[in-house]
Image (cartoon, rainbow, N blue to C red):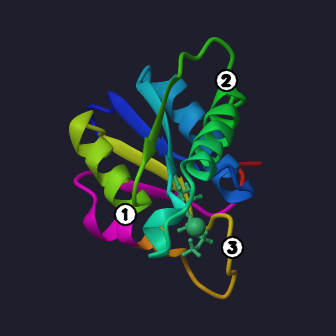
Amino acid sequence: MQNLRTILHPTDFSEPAKAAWQTACALARFYGARLVALHVVFPLTAAYTEVIPTEAIEQQIASGRQALEQLEPTEAGLAVEKRLETGDPVEMILRVAGELPADLIVMGSHGRTGLARLLMGSVAEQVVRKAPCPVLVVKRPIS
Ligand code: ATP
Ligand code: MN
C-alpha cells in the first residue's frame, strides 16, 4: 500500500458501488494513482442453457457501455480509464486486477441484489477471497 499506483473500481452501477466510487476517487486523488473503472456484463446466455438472441446480449453490452460513459469522477480534474468486459464478474475482476496490475480494489459490499442480511454479496466475497491485492469493501458513502 506504500506504492498505491493503480486502483481498480469494479462497478455494477448500484448505490453501494457509487459509495465505493467516491472512496476510489478520493484515494486516487490523494495518492495520484491511476484509476480504472470496470463493468462486467454477464451475458444472459452464461446463466441459462437456452440460446439467447445475439441482439439481447448486444443490448446488455450497449446499456453497460452507456452507464460506464456516464460515470463521472467525484474529484475535480481526475482522469479515469473505463473498461467493459463480458463474462463472469468475479473471474473478470480478478483477471483485470492481475493484468493491470492493481495495487488496490475498491468495491461495494453489496450490489444490485443488495441482500442486506448478508455481510457481503457473492461478487464482493469471492473477490476478497481470491484477489491478488488488498480489497477495500465500502459499506456506505463517506460523509
Ligand atoms: P449478489 O450478486 O450475490 O446477489 P449483491 O448484488 O448485493 O449480491 P455483489 O454483486 O457482491 O452484491 O456486489 C458487490 C460489489 O461488487 C458492487 O458494489 C460492485 O462494486 C461489484 N460488482 C458486482 N457486480 C459487478 C459487475 N457485474 N461488474 C463489476 N463490478 C461488479
Ligand atoms: Mn450482484
Q: Residue at x 28, y 58 (%)?
A: 131
Toward the bottom, the furthest residue is 117
Report, in whole angstroms, how far the alpha carbon at label 2 lies from the one at label 3. Answer: 26 Å
| Residue 41 position within the rendered picture, expressed as x and y whole percent measured from the top left | 52, 51
> Within 8 Å of ligand 1, the CB of disc 1?
yes
Identify residue type, mark 1: Val
Neighbours of disc 1 within 10 Å: few (<14), some (14-19), many (20+): many
Report, in whole angstroms, how far the alpha carbon at label 1 lies from the one at label 3. Answer: 16 Å
Q: Which residue is mark 1?
A: 127
Residue 34 occupies quadrant: top left
Image quadrant, ligand 2: bottom right
Q: Residue at x 40, y 48 (%)?
A: 105
Magenta span of residues: 126-140
User: Is residue 33 placed above or below 127 in the rendered structure?
Assistant: above
Q: Is residue 13 left or right of residue 107?
A: right
- The count of marks equals 3
Q: Secondary structure at mark 3?
A: loop
Between label 2 and label 3, give the one nearer the viewer: 3
Which of disc 3 and disc 1 is earlier in sequence? Answer: 3
